[in-house]
Image (cartoon, rainbow, N blue to C red):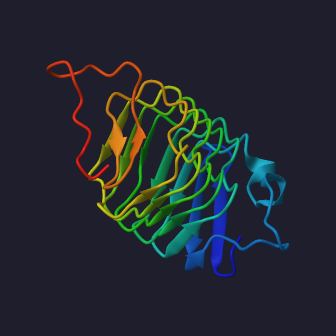
Amino acid sequence: EGYNVTFSLDTETGILVISGEGGMYRSPVQGGIYESDTPFYPYKDYIRSVVIEEGVTSIGAYAFSNCINLTDVEIAFTVIAIGQQSFRNSTGLTEVVIPEGVVTIGDAAFWECTGLVNVTIPNSVMFIEDIAFCDCINLETLDWEINENITIEDDAFLGCEKLKEPIATKDMLIYFPYNYEFEDGYYAIPENI
């Protein structure tokens, strides 16, 4: 738990509610935290749904990592950062809607979420860090209006074999699907790349 953030888990329904003001938690040791250090680790097999309420500003590192029964997440508009490996290997997730206001999607945040098919990313996102969506092998659709100043690290979408559209920032081609269906036989790479 964070300094002003608490949680409640109904083990019968699997609904975990995060509430309060501020970030979920801070690293207890210099150099980072690990999955087993998070307050949800002992309950990871019970968690089916996560509700992050208004007032919470960040999702902590490893928070829901390996919650394989997690199928639904609601993120409040007050969240500005999704921490590293926060949903890693949460294979039951099929869709994630990241709300307007989130600025950073951390390293490996959704790495190995193999059930993930659709992701909505708002225009507020400025940083998608390394391997954020790596090996989301069933990810087909990104619903977003890309921010022209976004930074997407090289391997953010590595292994997302079912993505249907290329991903390009204002100055870099990030991802090009190997099975892209060319219109008129070619893909026009933006001039500034």
Judge whether 28 appears above or below 71 on screen: below
Query: Residue 187 location in percent, x, y?
Result: 24, 29
Which residue is rendered at x = 57% and y = 38% of the image? 134
Q: In this view, does 60 lie to the left or right of 57?
A: right
Residue 171, given in percent of the width and then of the height, sits at 34, 54
Which quadrant of the figure has residue 2? bottom right
Q: Where is residue 58 in the image (x, y as percent from the top left)?
A: 56, 69
Residue occupying image coordinates x 77% and y 71%: 27
Q: In this view, does 119 lie above or below 147?
A: above
Camera-side residue: 37 or 140?
A: 140
Q: Is 115 situated left or right of 2 in this image?
A: left
State which quarter of the image contains the N terminus. Answer: bottom right
Image quarter of residue 186: top left
Q: Quadrant of residue 92?
A: top right
**x and y, in percent, of residue 164 in the image:** 34, 27
Q: Residue at 48% x, 76% y: name it.
A: 55
Rendered view: 132 above or below 177: below
